[in-house]
Amino acid sequence: MERELVEAARRGDRAAYDVLVRRKVESVHRTARAILGNEADAQDATQEAFVAAWRHLPRLRDPERFDAWFGRILVNACRMALRTRRGVREIAIDGDGRDTPFTVRRPDPADTAVDAMAFDRAFDRLSVDERAILTLHHLEARGLPEVAAILGIPVGTVKSRLLRARRALERSLDRERPL
């Protein structure tokens, strides 16, 4: 069903594209919100991604890869939003009220849970690429092959970058813990 919508949208059918947008806008916005950390930037990046996708849709070679193709557009829109934004960023991972999906496994079982504010500060210190890969894999629950397709990199590279991002988050969380 989605393939037919993508094909129709590629041919210029705005109604088909509208259906695609309605189906995806919530998860796209949630991903942008997690990467960017605030509502206004997430709304802008979401809108920018959908506009860019519509503009470039005729160039999409394989309609089966629409999600991965669109994911790259979204991550790039988030990168652009961060480049143009100046000042302090606020990162809120669980804006929809769900528990934060990011957990750091520590060797010490007595280690306590990190409070949400400390987590937000730690997550804010990560690069946009680290936030994006953690968000795609953990928050959006996308598998490694799908993350690889979205970011346009090999699965092995996703694994190594995911490991580095987790370690960076762990180091950043360590900075939040009292001595």
Image: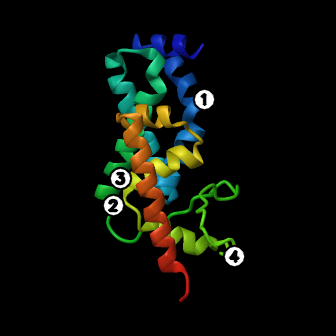
Q: Which residue is mark 4?
A: 110
SS at badge 3? helix
Q: Residues within 10 Å of mark 1 (few under 14, many from 20)?
A: few
SS at badge 2? loop
C-alpha gap between disc 1 and disc 4: 43 Å
Q: Extreme left residue here?
A: 83
Q: Are marks 2 and 3 in contact (CB under 8 Å)?
A: yes
Q: Which residue is mark 2?
A: 85
Q: Which residue is mark 1?
A: 23
Q: Residues within 10 Å of mark 4 (few under 14, many from 20)?
A: few
SS at badge 1? helix
Residue 69: % across, % down: 40, 28
Residue 142: % across, % down: 55, 38
Residue 11: % across, % down: 40, 10
The image quadrant that residue 52 belongs to is top left
Q: Are marks 2 and 4 in contact (CB under 8 Å)?
A: no
Q: Residue at x 64, y 59 (%)?
A: 100
Q: Is 166 above or below relative to 110?
A: above
SS at badge 4? loop
Going by the numbered disc 3, the residue's amino acid type is Ala
Could you say which is closer to the camera, residue 175 or residue 51?
Answer: 175
Q: Residue at x 55, y 87 (%)?
A: 178
The image quadrant that residue 105 belongs to is bottom right
Going by the numbered disc 2, the residue's amino acid type is Arg
C-alpha gap between disc 2 and disc 1: 28 Å
Q: Are marks 3 and 1 in contact (CB under 8 Å)?
A: no
Res 90 seen here:
no
Which part of the image, by quadrant, shows the N terminus? top right
